[in-house]
Image: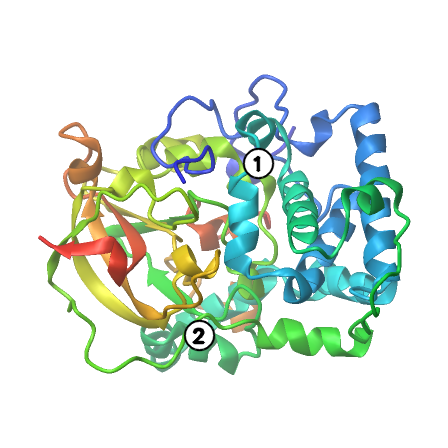
Amino acid sequence: MSSEHGHVPHRGRPDPRTEQHLTPEQIQALEARVKALEAVLVAKGIVSPATLDELASIYEHDIGPMNGAKVVARAWVDPAYKQRLLTNATAAIAELGFGGLQGEHMVVVENTPTVHNVVVCTLCSCYPWPVLGLPPTWYKSAPYRSRVVIDPRGVLREFGLELPESVEVRVWDSSAELRYMVLPERPAGTEQLSEAELAALVTRDALIGVAKVNVKSDRA
Amino acid sequence: MNGIHDLGGMTCFGPIVREENEPVFHAPWERRVFAMTILAMGAVDTLDAFRHAIERMDPLQYLTSTYYEHWLAALETLLVERGLATPEELATGSARLTEGTRTPISPDAIAEIVRRGVPADRPAAQGVPRFRPGDQVMARNLHPLGHTRLPRYVRGKRGMIVRVHGTFVYPDTNAHEGGERPQPVYSVRFSARELWGPTAAERDSVYLDLWEEYLDQA
């Protein structure tokens, strides 16, 4: 199997928390339950099938980490924008047309040669939807949520990121309605790249803080 | 409540399992649950009540089920508790239309709802926030039986105010019958050693966003 940054992730025992390990019987039961729920909500006029499709489609096609990547690239090329982003992230992100559900109150934290930031929600799975889309399963899983606050360096090592002792690690636990995005360091050797080319380097994992941005990087 | 959802600081769950090229939804039923939950929320209850409904799941069920199963369970729970559906209706998928049906939102309105979001901040009340950046505080040793956003791993720990975020709806009351009770939310820095003891890296830290009622002057 391939993986970003050439790092092979750990593969533990079959995990009941991941969708792939549901049995066909469990999936059938879930499908029936969800179908019944939808029929009831539609009959009561609380939702319509068309609105459900429209909403899901927005998160499948229009909203995702490519939005956060554009914000980062703009901050890398425009120092005044970066300043606005770090002091009032919600307004600065809105300048690029992003905002709304689960990103109503944004904070952006900056990685530097001496400070590394990483984001989590230990109590549920809060995540900045307008700039990152819906969270990956690992971000919502018990192993990540439990351990990144107590052993951030060990967790980052699992993601292939070894930080020297001299770097200060800051973990941001999204315990209220503020939503966090990391502004990663601009990699060396990118001085000639355009804003769009820079955005193409920025991965989802770098925006969460479990990876750095590399010059040659697969999108996560 | 001191529930299984409050995972911060546990080390028993093994390696983080990642999936390459993960799809936004793994199955059509997940896609439906996601959209139904978001759209029904306005009719059903607050986001805080929804989170609390997940927290009230059976702990064994919580740990062995997937994310959207949590959402599904919470949505069903709230629909029944608020009298919007009966367990029989949810089991059969056949609604008994006893009350006036609603008019669902038009698909054309969805993009605007997503763009606007549901802000949780409120106008500041009279008087300044109790704490200022630089103040030393201690997270209260509270163990409410209802909803709270004060994780166990910071209770009784000392930290420092780094930022005043503004005034926000208080989840501990808003999830129940207590109303919004808006109050200041602070970014509070806890050193890793204060939380985890002397083996933690000296300069590392964890930042949490905590409501004023969670904090005492230290």
Q: Chain of mark 2?
A: A
Side of B196 relative to B59 (left or right) = left
The amino acid type, in three-letter code, at marker 2 is: Thr
The amino acid type, in three-letter code, at marker 1 is: Met
Side of B111 relative to A161 (left or right) = right
Secondary structure at numbered mark 2: helix
Which numbered marker is on residue B57? 1
- Front residue of this view, candidates A5 and B37: B37
Instruction: Answer yes or no: is residue B113 visible.
Output: yes
Q: Residues within 10 Å of mark 2 (few under 14, many from 20)?
A: many
Q: Chain of mark 1?
A: B
Give the residue at x 79% y 78%.
B108
Residue A9 in percent (x, y) is at: 53, 28
Between the C-alphas of marks 1 and 2, the distance is 33 Å
Number of on-image labels: 2
Residue B39 in percent (x, y) is at: 70, 63
Give the residue at x 26% y 53%.
A113
Q: Are marks 1 and 2 on the same chain?
A: no
Q: Which residue of the protein is positioned furthest toward the front in this rendering?
A: B98
The residue carrying mark 2 is A90
Secondary structure at numbered mark 1: loop
Q: In the rendered image, which quarter contains the N terminus of chain B?
A: top left
